Amino acid sequence: MSESTNAFGDNAVRRRGTAQTTGRFVVVFEDASDAEPLLREVAGMSSVANSRDFAQQSVDLDETANADATVFAELGMAVVSADPTQMGALQGFAADRSRGVLAVVPELIHHVLPAPGYVQGYRDGVDDLAGRLGTGEAPGADEPIYNDTDEFTWGLQAIEMELSAFTGQGIRVCVLDTGMDLEHPDFAGRIVTSESFVSGETAQDGHGHGTHCIGTSLGGASETGRRYGVASEAEIYAGKVLGNEGSGSDAGILAGINWAITNKCAVVSMSLGADVAEPHPPYTIAGDRALAQGTLIIAAAGNNANRPDDPGFVGAPANSPSIMAVGALDSSLTVARFSARSSPARGGHVDVAGPGVAVFSSWPMPDRYNTISGTSMATPHAAGVAALWAQATGRRGLELWATLAQETRRIDRSSLDVGLGLVVVAQ
């Protein structure tokens, strides 16, 4: 992420409240079926693309680049390029909520790879520990409770993976990120469906962040036999919404969510966001409509803290009340110094926590593996756990959210930082 927005994958501190925008707008409609008629009849737009024009609603943003608007049918919203007269008409309808338009807001830009040192291996964990020593934070927690072994990463031990009989079989999980290394040998033989929602790029991961998150949530074992992935038999939906340079806009992310819902994914994992304290209306509505259709969206709380001096705040989209926000813990189950704290804003709270410091997982070849830190790494742990609970209980949407929250492991940390506690697997 730039200094204003990021995909939450490191421990750098961000400038706040200065979100980058594209110059386009996101329009949220009360009734999804009214989206295209209102755009044509009220705003006078002649060129309107619709996600339903594409197989499995996999929108090709290259094909829609010249359209006045692109409608995401399952979400009931559109990204529009409009002149002042057209925008005035839409904003007028938004001001009178009885006329079918709930919100008209600027389209945000999101980034990954915000600062030097993001990819620094186990040093992330050492730096996190060094940052706590002498501060009085978590007395006695300087010794790790868990360590990576030849059998399991420390994160899988913490979520009690070795006790579970579930694998996520039959559950579809979508990770919206920088794509996936589709030739990675650890995923040979797996069911993988991939799409790119980034103009001019394939779903192949040219960055690394997406492959790492997919490995944690959905991977299996490394070449040495160490298990690092939670839902090792779930169906993988890899949606590229952030480009190889690490940035993407609301259009791509909303297209990815719309695609995941269309394909009946039970869980969507998003390790991305913007350091803005107020919820971004499109994601609040998207989260609501996803839950109603049986899809739980889980997102990274953010890395804008610098504890103990600055606890940060939960950024968008995780601060939407209808999206589950995940904070990060280290191997001593201490809150990571970069992990954002709950804010008083509606929806701005951390819901649960997951392992997020010095996390070993897959990485694009030839490196094959990497160890990095962030609430980005905690989020796919939670998504994988959600997949196991979905398999174990058959629950979806709000019922799955409630189960994941109810079954957390309570830990001796403030609920402002960890919500209801550490996610743990179904047994």
Image (spheres, rainbow, N blue to C red):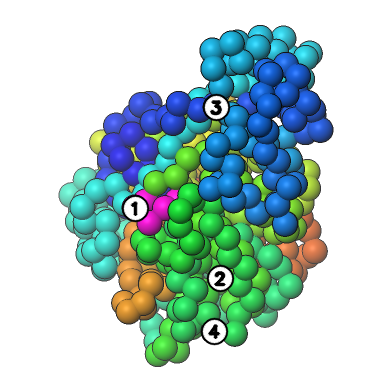
Q: Give the mark nearer the N terminus: 3 vs 1.
A: 3
Q: Which residue is mark 1?
A: 245
- Amino acid identity at mark 3: Ser
Q: CA distance from mark 4 to mark 1?
A: 26 Å
- Amino acid identity at mark 1: Glu
What kind of element bears circle 3? loop
Labelled pair 3, 1 in contact (Cβ < 8 Å): no
Q: Which residue is mark 2?
A: 218
Q: CA distance from mark 4 to mark 2?
A: 13 Å
Residue 311 appears in the figure: no
Q: Residue at x 62, y 68 (%)?
A: 193
Quadrant of res 78: top right
Quadrant of res 426: bottom right
Q: Which residues are magenta?
A: 242-246
Task: Locate the C terminus and report the quarter of the image it occupies.
Answer: bottom right
Specify whether residue 245 is painted magenta.
yes
Q: Which residue is mark 4?
A: 188
Q: Nearer the viewer, mark 3 or mark 4?
A: 3
Q: Nearer the viewer, mark 4 or mark 2?
A: 4
Q: Residues within 10 Å of mark 1 (few under 14, many from 20)?
A: few
In this rendered view, identify the residue nearer to me: 417 or 247. Answer: 247
Labelled pair 4, 2 in contact (Cβ < 8 Å): no
